[in-house]
Amino acid sequence: MFTQNLDFKTTDLDTFPFPFRSDNYRYSNDLRKLEDVNLVTITPEYEMQVRAKRRLLDEQPEVRYQSFPHTMEMQWEFLEMVFEMAIQKYPQHFELHKDGDEWTFKNNILDEQQTFTFGDASTLPYEPYDFAGRHFHQDFVLMVHRDDNYYLEVGQVSYAALFSAHWNTGMSFNEIHGPVPFVSRNGDDLVDRIRRFLLGINPGEPWTRINWNLMADRWDVNYETMDVWEPQRKLVTAENAGKLVRLRVEEQKFYRMPRSNAILFVLNTQFLPLEDLKLRQEWFDLTYSVLQDIPEPMAEYKGIAPFLPQSVEFLRREDEKLKAQGGA
Amino acid sequence: MYNSPVLFDASPALTTQLVPNAYFKKAAIITDQAQHSAVSALIEKLYDTPHDVHVFKDAEQARAFIVAQKMGTHFYVVANWDEATTIFTTAVEEGVSEAEIQVQLRDDVKKYIYCMKCFTSSEILKEAVNVQCACGAHLEVGPFYSKVRQGYISYPFIPEA
């Protein structure tokens, strides 16, 4: 039975990718070069997140993991890349021993060890991409470059925001973003601009951007469970929004895979309850300002329209309290 | 290939009237009813453009006819939905692009929804807004189509009592 238990939030605020830089927000091509090219990060919540991710993958395997049979070579390329990054950055947590094609990967945090034959998927308990992805808390989406576009051919997604690996498999970058009211401040078609930008990404030079959303008492929202989470959004009030509503931030990283020429999307999703925004006054002020100014089409697309007013009201009340304390 | 064109209710290939394409040197007409007025109207409009007519019997005969055509041939299909779908799919499998095919239906277009609960595709009325899947799920019909899932997205909901 599929379960959602949102008992996770970011505790190390220094690693939280706070999304807002100004007091209003519109879609923009805010891609920038990634400074730390190593995608592996171990946060205080690593073990909890990985275990929750695995539980979701086991409960809804068809929803959360999809691949085409012809992607196996790309999957091994992914496995090799992330395992090499893991041992390079965290040799105390991960080990990789190679004896020809006989490899042994150790995850010392989870106390796990797996020996397998590189290139032989039958020696792993899951497909190579699925197996490797289960050792890291991010979502991984592999978009294959074809006909000047990218097509989703492998996806492992456990933190969906109106997304489904099952539904979106095989779709082009433009098809996936079909529902997005993507217009920049200049009225440009941002989806196509970003697609064209991604065409120019080189191996070894990954890029990054930050996406954000609000989540009402949920780990994720996908199409398959819409009948469950859609009514829940209406339970949010100004009184409980501080605990139930979380600022969901998705740190997206884009890697050109050197052998397959595909683009790997790495999505690091972190949550901060609205009540925790007070821990950083600047974050509180920016979030309060941005949420007051969200255009309706954007609120609808992001799925936050049913509980946005209550969230803003919660922040307004908190703002009043803070000002009263400051003036006292 | 999973992202090859498929015939669905909003396919660019669908037309209510076949129109000769002047950029092609030959016309290949495939129909499940040779005497249909749409076929004779098209032939009349083709003037001196060479054309062949194939009367559809099964996919393999249609495939042989399609494969025999040379580069520069435009395909025109006049058929019922099920036959048209078979012909279209066969043509795509043999390398014909969507820009090289026009399809005029003799019956109504069919529309399919993909159930996000039981992961099956089923036919629905074209104007349907909400439907109930055979699995029992209540579904709102969405606007996005998947070539892989061969249906429109559905949004599950719990109907008000």
Image (spheres, helix red, strand yellow):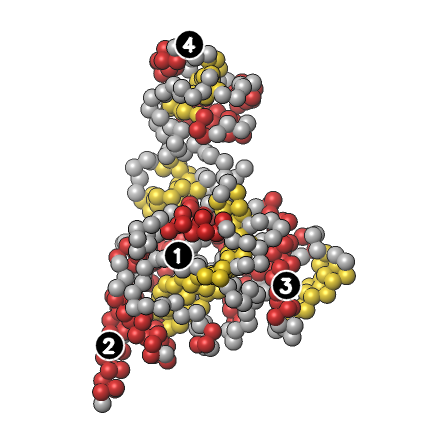
Is residue B105 in view?
Answer: yes
Residue holding disc 3 = A83
Q: Residue B1 versus residue B22: which sits nearer the camera? A: B22
Q: Chain of mark 4?
A: B
Q: Give the structural element (helix, strand or loop) at label 4.
A: loop
Q: Amino acid at mark 4?
A: Asp
The label nearer to you, 1 versus 2, is 1
Q: Quadrant of the C terminus of chain B?
A: bottom left
Q: Chain of mark 3?
A: A
Q: Amino acid at mark 1?
A: Asn
Mark 4 vs mark 2, CA separation in Å: 79 Å
The image shows residue B159 at horizontal and vertical percentages of 30, 52
Q: Chain of mark 1?
A: A
Q: Give the structural element (helix, strand or loop) at label 3.
A: helix
Residue holding disc 4 = B48
Q: Left of A133 or right of it: where is B8?
A: left
The image shows residue B128 at horizontal and vertical percentages of 31, 39
Q: Are marks 1 and 4 on the same chain?
A: no
Which one is earlier in the sequence, the residue at label 3 or at label 1?
Answer: 1
Q: Residue A100 versus residue B21: which sits nearer the camera? A: B21
**Which residue is found at the position 24% from the left and 76% from the top?**
A317
Q: Amino acid at mark 3?
A: Phe
Which image quadrant is residue B103 in?
Answer: top left
Q: Are marks 3 and 4 on the same chain?
A: no
User: Count of labels shown?
Assistant: 4
